[in-house]
Image (tube, rainbow, N blue to C red):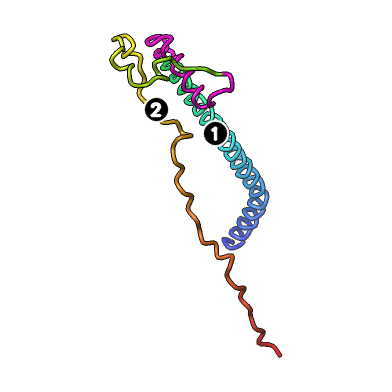
Amino acid sequence: MKKIIKGQVKNQVKEQVSRILPRIKESVNATLEAKVLTRLSQSSRTSYAIVADLSEMELKKILEAYEADKAILDTYGDSTILKRRREDDDQEGPSAGSNRGSKRQKEGGEQASASTPSEKATEEEPVQNTCQMEEPPHPVFKTGADDQPIVQTSQHP
C-alpha cells in the first residue's frame, strides 16, 4: 500500500512540476531582462553624465583662461594689446606701404643713451617667433617596400 501511495505521489509531483516549471522559467527570464535593461539604461546615463562632466570641465578651463586674460588686460591695460598687435604684425610680415618703427629704431646705436626711464619700461625683450625657429628633421622609417616578394614553390607535381 505504501508503494502505491508513493507511486501516486510521484506522478502528481511530476505533473505539478511540469506545470510549474514553465512559469518559473518565464518569471526568471522576465526578472533577468528587467535587470539587464536597468543596467543598460544606467550605463547610458553614466556615459551621458561622464560626457556632461567632461564638457563642463572644458568650459571651466575656457572660462579660467578668459578670466586670466581679462585680469592681465585689466592689470597691464593697453600696453598688452599693443604688444600683441606688434607680434601679430611681425608674423604677417611688412606690408608694401608700411613705414612702421620709430626713427631711433631705424638709426640704431644712439637710442640707448637717449632713452628715458619710461621708454625703458616699455621696451620689449626679443621674442623668437615660431616661423624663425628651425624645424627638426622628420624621422625616416624603413618600410620594407623595397623587399623582394616571397616566392612559394608548390610541392604538387
First-in-chain label (2 vs 1): 1
Q: Please give the residue where the numbered disc 1 appears in the rendered image.
A: 47
Report how many numbered discs are placed on residues in the image.
Answer: 2
Q: Please give the residue where the numbered disc 2 appears in the rendered image.
A: 127
Q: Is residue 73 magenta?
A: yes
* Residue 46 coordinates in the image, percent (x, y): 53, 32
Q: For the residue marked with disc 1, what is the amino acid? A: Ser
* Residue 25 coordinates in the image, percent (x, y): 63, 47
Magenta segment boundaries in residue numbering = 70-97
In the rendered image, the vertical position of residue 5 relative to residue 62, given as above or below? below
Q: For the residue marked with disc 2, what is the amino acid? A: Val
Residue at 35%, 14% (x, y): give it. Answer: 122
The quarter of the displayed image where residue 116 is located = top left
Circle 2 SS class = loop
In the displayed structure image, the side of residue 154 where residue 112 appears, left or right: left
In the rendered image, the vertical position of residue 5 relative to residue 138, given as above or below? below
Q: Which quarter of the image is occupied by the C terminus?
A: bottom right
Circle 1 SS class = helix
In the rendered image, the vertical position of residue 134 relative to residue 89, given as above or below? below
Q: Nearer the viewer, residue 124 or 84?
A: 124
* Residue 34 coordinates in the image, percent (x, y): 61, 37
* Label 1 packing within 10 angstroms: few (<14), some (14-19), many (20+): few
